[in-house]
Structures are given as C-alpha cells and as structure tokens.
Amino acid sequence: MSCTRLRAKEINARPRGRHWQSLPYLTLALLVGCVAPGEGNFQRPPTPAEVEQYNAMVQPEERIVCRTEIPIGSNIPVRKCRLAVDIDETSVFHREQLRRALR
C-alpha cells in the first residue's frame, strides 16, 4: 500500500469534529440535572389540621393563613402560609401603591 493511501485511512479513522471532547460535560450536565434543587432545605407547608391547631394556641395577631397561589410566570399552584397580619399589611401597601400610580 502506498504512503498516500495509508495517510488517507488515518485521516478517515480520526473522529470528525470535536464532539467526543464534550462528552464529559454532557455527562456532568445530565448528573447535575437529576438532582432536585434544594432537596435538603425543603420544608412542606403545614397541613390544614396543623394550621388549625396552631391558630387555636396563639393570639389573633399571630395566626397563620394558608392559601394556594399561582406565581407569576407559572401555571403551577403553590401553597403559601403566612401570618394574617403580614397579608393585611401587604394588601394595604399594594392598594396604596396602586392609588399613587393611578393619580
């Protein structure tokens, strides 16, 4: 076999492009994507029975209210529990901001 023909076989035997070099990065992305974010810090919202029991033991200004909210940019409802006082203060603040904006 001639030297030119051997050289052509060597060139054809090499992988085309650099796709094989990105394999470790793709594997890493796959493994990282399988881990749930914040898995260790996850706290479930209290059940309705737990909320009722808690509210029976505390003062009215310390009671919590749980409701289902849909975050902006999402269609997935999330259960949020907050102090009733905080909800009232936030509502008053947002109403006032809306009045200022519409003047």
Image: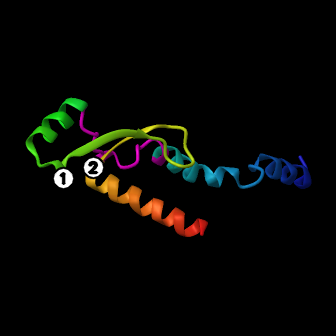
The residue lying at 12 percent from left, 49 percent from top is 59
- Residue ID for mark 1: 61
Q: Position of residue 65 (x, y in %)?
A: 28, 43
Whether residue 33 is in magenta: the answer is: yes
Which is more toward the observer, 48 or 45? 48
The secondary element bearing badge 1 is classed as: helix
Answer few, some or many: residues within 10 Å of disc 1's Cα (few below 14, many 20 plus, some between 14 and 19): few
Q: Position of residue 30 (x, y in %)?
A: 52, 44
Q: Would you identify the image quadrant in which residue 48 lies?
A: top left
Q: Residue at x 24, y 45 (%)?
A: 64
Q: Which residue is mark 2?
A: 84
Residue most extreme to the front: 103
Real-space Cα distance between discs 1 and 2? 7 Å
Q: Kindly check if marks 1 and 2 are in contact, taking CB atoms under 8 A apart as contact.
A: yes
x and y percentages locating residue 66 in the rendered image: 31, 40
Magenta region, mostly helix, strand or loop?
Answer: loop
- Magenta segment: 32-47
Relative horizontal placement of residue 88, taking residue 27 as reference (left or right): left
How many labels, in total? 2
Which residue is at the far top? Answer: 49
Which is nearer the eye, 44 or 61? 61
What element does badge 2 sit on?
helix
